[in-house]
Amino acid sequence: MIAVSASLAIKSLPRASRSDFTMVSGKAIAIMLLYASALFYPRAHAFVQPPVRQGALQEQPLQTVKAYLQAIHARDPRRAYGLISATDRSVRDESTHLYSQPRLEGFALELARTLAAGLDVRIIEQNVESDKARLEVWYRVPTGDELSAQLLDWNERKLDALRPAAKQRLATSLEDLKRQGKMITLEGRETFHLVREKNRWKIFLDWASRTRVIFKSRVPAGEELEVRFPRNDFLIAMNQPLQVDFTLKNRSRRPIVARLNHLIEPRRFADMVEMIACGSLAPVRLEPGETREFWSSYILAGMSAKSRLSIVYEFNVAVQKADKAIFPTRHAGAP
């Protein structure tokens, strides 16, 4: 990982000793001050930030990038949405965006914001114009993995149920770790495009050029298999990897085996969707009440902007009997 730091060194003018000034008359001092000011101020303009005029830009692009990264890592899509450009927001309204994003609420969100506040970001390369900017940045953010047991796997319901004293201890533990600088961190490198709107910099994601991908599930009627997608609605650029997470839960009182079949709808897009990884290609055995997590990755290619498709996870479920899974058979002509 490349870490970039920059510093600006400003040399101070050499000081004259007190004895030197006793030899100079008041008139000579005035002349010297005027002369010094004529020499000093033209040079100072190279590194002194002039005062911001009314209506001038109120913030730098890096501030917006940092706030956006903090919101993303805190799983706070509401705050992130407010930092996105109006052009992008016209493509996807806030309620749709919130529904499609992983997010935390309550005390879990408070803790996540505390962690994200420790995010460090540095500029690798930037190009800033009057109304647009491009920043490539490196960042590092605390993960809180040291306290994973105390964080209860970020279970919002369990964290909200903690007593006030327990919440305070947990929050204090996070602050102590941050202050000591001993936290496990995640590092990343990303490029952001920004646009200027009403004297504010906003993140431009170009949602209008992306393909909308929605994940759905189908299970046999009456079966005890539960399928959940923490996030199932994506806007994806061409040739950008897409990862979807999902969980399977056996709600029955007997072992079952689930077999997954991937379907692309409409079918004309099937050749444009490439699966690059899947954690559930083989049949999955689930014990009574067991929940397991899986993920799959895809790449899209060859689709036009504003296309929309669905990836359907169709499951067959079998009852496990004597180490043998009995899947229901599909009759000829059946859908």
Image (cartoon, grey):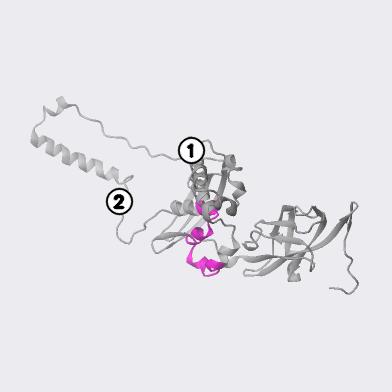
Q: Nearer the viewer, residue 67 or 218?
A: 218
| Element type where label 2 sits in the image | loop
289 in magenta: no
Outermost residue toward the top in this view: 19
Q: Is residue 211 left or right of residue 73?
A: right
Q: In the image, is residue 6 above or below residue 257?
A: above
| Element type where label 1 sits in the image | helix
Q: Nearer the viewer, residue 162 or 298?
A: 162
Q: In the image, is residue 135 above or below residue 306?
A: above
Q: Position of residue 320 (x, y in %)?
A: 86, 55
Q: Is residue 209 left or right of residue 36?
A: right
* Displayed quadrant of residue 217: bottom right
- The residue that mark 2 highlights is 50
Amino acid at pointer 2: Pro
* Displayed quadrant of residue 212: bottom right
- The residue that mark 1 highlights is 176
Q: Which residues are magenta?
A: 70-95
Q: Position of residue 147 (x, y in %)?
A: 58, 41
